[in-house]
Image (cartoon, rainbow, N blue to C red):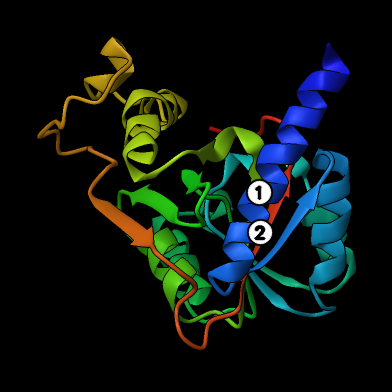
Amino acid sequence: MEEIVKQHMAILGQRTVDALVKKGYLAEYLPDEAAMRERLIGLIPDKASVGFGGSMTIRHMDIKGELEKKGCALYDHNAAADAAQAEEFRRKQLSCDVFLSSTNAVTMDGKLYNVDGKGNRVAAMIYGPGEVIIAAGVNKIVPDLEAAVERVNGYASPMNNLRFNSDNPCAKTGVCADCDSPKRICNIATILHRCPSGAKIRVLLAGESLGF
């Protein structure tokens, strides 16, 4: 049964990768998280400035130590010493050599859907860094944009609110209520219909369930 699941994931993953390539992305399917971690570390040049978009997928791969060995400057606002440094790191992410993120959803026809609170993550994904690398598990794959919105509203957003110990409604009900909370983390939604002109965006899809 496990082998059948892997085969199904590979079929969905490769189909989505093919669609992303047609949309101008550099896209690859990798069998698992370990292979994606190795590939990700290998893609980042020595002494590069690297921004982190707050992805649980990237965090779980625990690559910071390897990047430090390569002499990279790391801009992770979630690991900042204080609010001022966090804001400094967010701004540096917009012009770093490599920006690392995941995506809230990727459609099988090659669209990327993301929802942000401040907008720094989606801003850096769209324009600025020398290269953007998006790492995601096959659990992020959805049939279309309608399903992408449903995935965020019914799963990703409530999970991230729980991660932040938020008292927003979705952390209590499990589903988005389109709330008016001052602590709302779903203020900006972006759709990348295809790779922006002149941008270098690489999408790595792993055949496992990773992140939210």
Q: Nearer the viewer, residue 49 or 31?
A: 31
User: Which amino acid type is marked by label 1?
Assistant: Arg
**Which residue matches tag 1?**
15
Percent x, y for residue 205? 69, 48
Label 2's element? Answer: helix
Percent x, y for residue 17? 66, 55
Left or right: residue 70 compared with residue 164: right
Q: Which mark is residue 160?
A: none
**Residue 3 vertical placement versus 18 (above, below):** above
**Which residue matches tag 2?**
18
Question: Is mark 1 in CB contact (under 8 Å) with mark 2?
Answer: yes
Q: Quadrant of residue 160?
A: top left
* C-alpha span from label 1 to label 2: 5 Å
Percent x, y for residue 15? 66, 49
Residue 51 visible in this rendered orientation of the protein: no
Identified at 47% across, 27% down, the residue is: 163
Identified at 51% across, 57% down, the residue is: 110
Label 1's element? Answer: helix
Percent x, y for residue 93? 51, 71
**Residue 144 vertical placement versus 68 (above, below):** above
